[in-house]
Image (tube, rainbow, N blue to C red):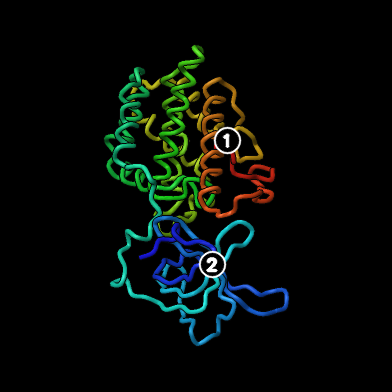
Amino acid sequence: MKYLKDYKDGDRFFDIYLCKHKVSAVTKNGKPYESVILQDKTGTIDGKIWDPNSAGIADFDALDYIEVYGDVTSFQGALQVNVKRVRKCSEEEVNPSDYLPVSKYDIEEMYSELLKYIHSIQNPYLKQLLSRFFIEDEDFVVAFKKSSAAKTVHHGFVGGLLQHTLSVTRMCDYYCKNYERLNRDLLLTAAICHDMGKTRELSAFPQNDYTDEGQFLGHIVIGTEMVGEKIREIPGFPAILASELKHCILAHHGEYEFGSPKKPAIMEALALNFADNTDAKLQTFTELMDNTTETGWLGFNRLFDSNVIGTRVE
């Protein structure tokens, strides 16, 4: 099959893809059309069906596999498909592994590196807490390896949560080598646990959508509750250590307007906020540049509050 990453402006579009999302809409002139998001393991592409009642457009729903014929165009710096024909496919025609976006890094190698950080923790209570999640809880380990870190913004792929967590943990370890006042055991434990609530906030692929629990509570509250439940199972876990760890998780978004229930009150919480924000923003910029064919200015980006462009100096 031809993967989505291999298409460029002007190409003829023809192959089987997963319809991740489908919505009906109306143009300014009152003409109905359908907007779809097509997905394979290399990413997603927007598609527009301007004549949904055409004989060449078969009935299909979101999460169906569909054979699509059309043309690739560029719209506001991103590729888009002008869909001419659609055929709904059976699952026997596809290999599901071709349609799940996956981290470009080896998942088992990343997890092995994360375990090395866990084994380096000296505090017996924090080490036991991490072991109960990342070594002893097999269901959690499976979910953690498969989860994305977000629905759309950054690391929205299988292994994305693991990749993001490992990157944040690496940065926090670096901080500890430069700022001696940081409690390495506390900061690394917080880094490893900070987004674990996303294993329950988001459903598994191919849906990768918010669960009821995710909608009601969000990953910050869910993760804090998960940590609290395990802490209560560990005899003698110091109360102040539990509060500091949970505070780091609650404050890792940094600001109230960014969904953070608390602002950082200790150095470790501040360091975690910086590491989390750095990785999220740089990964988002990376994905933005990877998914455009434009070489000039890309226009105003709300996340960065700026007009953005790729670096031109090699």
Q: Secondary structure at mark 1?
A: loop
Looking at this view, name the residue that lies furthest to the front: 314
Label 2 sits on what residue type?
Gly
Foreground disc of the pair 2, 1: 2
Label 1 sits on what residue type?
His
Q: Which residue is mark 2?
A: 10
At x 47% / y 62%, what residue is drawn?
7
Looking at this view, name the residue that lies furthest to the right: 29
Q: Quadrant of the N terminus?
A: bottom left
Looking at this view, name the residue that lies furthest to the bottom: 55
Q: Identify the image quadrant of residue 284.
A: top right
Q: Is residue 66 left or right of residue 280?
A: left
Percent position of residue 68, x then y:
45, 73
Percent position of residue 244, x then y:
50, 23
Task: Using the image, tell me which numbered label, if any, was put on residue 278.
Answer: none
Q: Decide: is 37 above or below 150.
A: below
Between 127 and 233, the residue placed more toward the observer is: 127
Q: Which residue is mark 1?
A: 253
